[in-house]
Image (tube, rainbow, N blue to C red):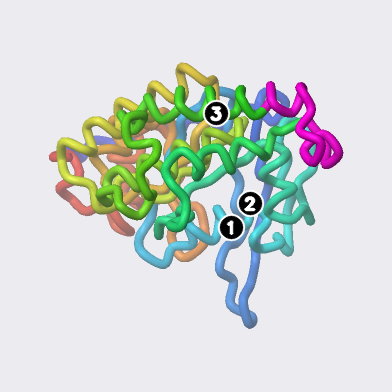
Amino acid sequence: MHNSQPPAPSPQPPAASSLLAVENIGISFGGLKAVEGFSVRLPAGGLYGLIGPNGAGKTTVFNLLTGVYPATTGRISLDTQNLNGLKPHEVAAAGIARTFQNIRLFPGLNVLDNVQLAGQLRAREGLASTLLRTRRYAHEESEIRRKAFELLDLFGLQARAEEPADSLSYGYQRYLEIVRALAAEPKVLLLDEPAAGLNSQEKIELAKSIRQIRDRFGVAILLIEHDMGLVMEICEQITVLDHGVIIAHGSPPEIQNDPKVIAAYLGSDVGAV
């Protein structure tokens, strides 16, 4: 960390070139503004970070983006489709998938079924084909299974496909949740603290896997993360929240050298991460 004047923040991509365009969204709970005037424009294939102190409103932003909370102000659009007012399953169908800070797998299902269930979101065959077990239905089920195995292989989980999901180690459960989100074939993947609870080696593997996911599937990624080393290593642009308001947006070096960010969250030793 040095004390020279930080460079001017990098502008976000213009709305026309953005896959996910979020403009001035906000929400209040009981008169308290939890998030106010939040904007981000995520391009196709972008890998962006969202950071801030505990209670800054980061997960609330994810809940707004995925329809868990309805935004009381602003607009959210994905590939020009307006997402305002859509329910979570409709947002998922439009192309946004997420993981959660607290793992939410289906513990009663095995690893493979957790992934295949998410893959059903893109199923094209209707109820009649499902009930009659038509040839097209069988082909589609076979494809969902093949893609599920392919995704499991990304994280070394293929050999454990038949094991109960809740029998996996904490780190592998984290990976499985990412795989399950990918099975929905999203355009945008929201990762809520994917490195939480992982050891150093697992974090190195996670960073590599996140890049591979972006490059292989062309999915745009927005991640919330407290591990500053991971964020600074893999994110191209970072947005910083404090008390529900954006205080900075820019590249990792710009964020590291922004006095407002240092004061609010990162601390004076960020240069060491």
Q: Is residue 174 left or right of residue 1?
A: right
When asked about the image quadrant of residue 87, the answer is bottom right
Q: Residue at x 58, y 41 (%)?
A: 118
Question: According to the image, label 2 marks what residue?
Answer: 66
Q: Residue at x 30, y 31 (%)?
A: 207
The quadrant in which the N terminus is found is top left
Spot the residue most to the top.
Answer: 216
Q: Earlier in the sequence, mark 1 or mark 3?
A: 1
Q: Residue 197 or 40: which is nearer the viewer? A: 197
Query: Which residues make up the magenta segment?
Result: 125-140
C-alpha separation, residue under disc 2 versus residue under disc 1: 5 Å
Residue type, label 1 = Asn
Tag 2's secondary structure? loop
Q: Residue 207 or 149: which is nearer the viewer? A: 149
Q: Is residue 127 magenta?
A: yes
Classify 30 as above or below 253.
below
